[in-house]
Amino acid sequence: MTNHPESFKVEIAYALPDLQILKQITVDTGSTVEHAIMQSGILDQFPDVTLTKNKIGIFGHFVPFNTILKPNDRVEIYRSLIVDPKKIRALRAKKSN
């Protein structure tokens, strides 16, 4: 039989072009990604982050907000893209010709 801790640590990551935030918090077993983000205070610190606009992931894989966290997960809050990556590649290709 496995022993499940009542609480464990996870990290919440958010990055701007000039600032990276990595917060370690303790959550209860059964906590969701949404709960951890709310608990972290990131939404208070960065009002531009909204749970309806920003995509969320764990270790680089998109997940829904109701995903149950596991010990040592890193919840990542992704910023919206400013420019379509395909357009950027096309512009670079034009410049190199």
Image: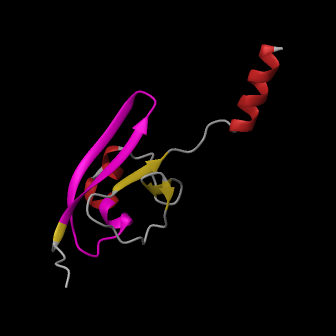
21 to 10, vertically: above or below: above
15 to 47, vertically: above or below: above
Quadrant the N terminus occupies: bottom left
32 displayed left or right of 55: left
The image position of residue 93, as x and y in percent, is 79, 22
The image position of residue 53, as x and y in percent, is 54, 55
The image position of residue 86, as x and y in percent, is 74, 37
- In front of the other: 17 or 45: 17
- In front of the other: 41 or 24: 24
- In front of the other: 31 or 45: 31
Q: Is residue 27 magenta?
A: yes
37 to 32, vertically: above or below: above
79 to 64, vertically: above or below: above
Name which quarter of the figure residue 16 lies in: top left
* Residue at (26, 63) in percent of width and height: 71
* Residue at (41, 38) in percent of width and height: 15
Q: Is residue 41 magenta?
A: no
Which residues are the magenta region? 8-36
* Residue at (68, 37) in percent of width and height: 85
How many marks are shown on the rendered structure?
A: 0
The image position of residue 72, as x and y in percent, is 27, 58
22 displayed left or right of 95: left
Task: Tell me which secondary structure the magenta stretch mostly adopts.
Answer: strand
Quadrant the C terminus occupies: top right
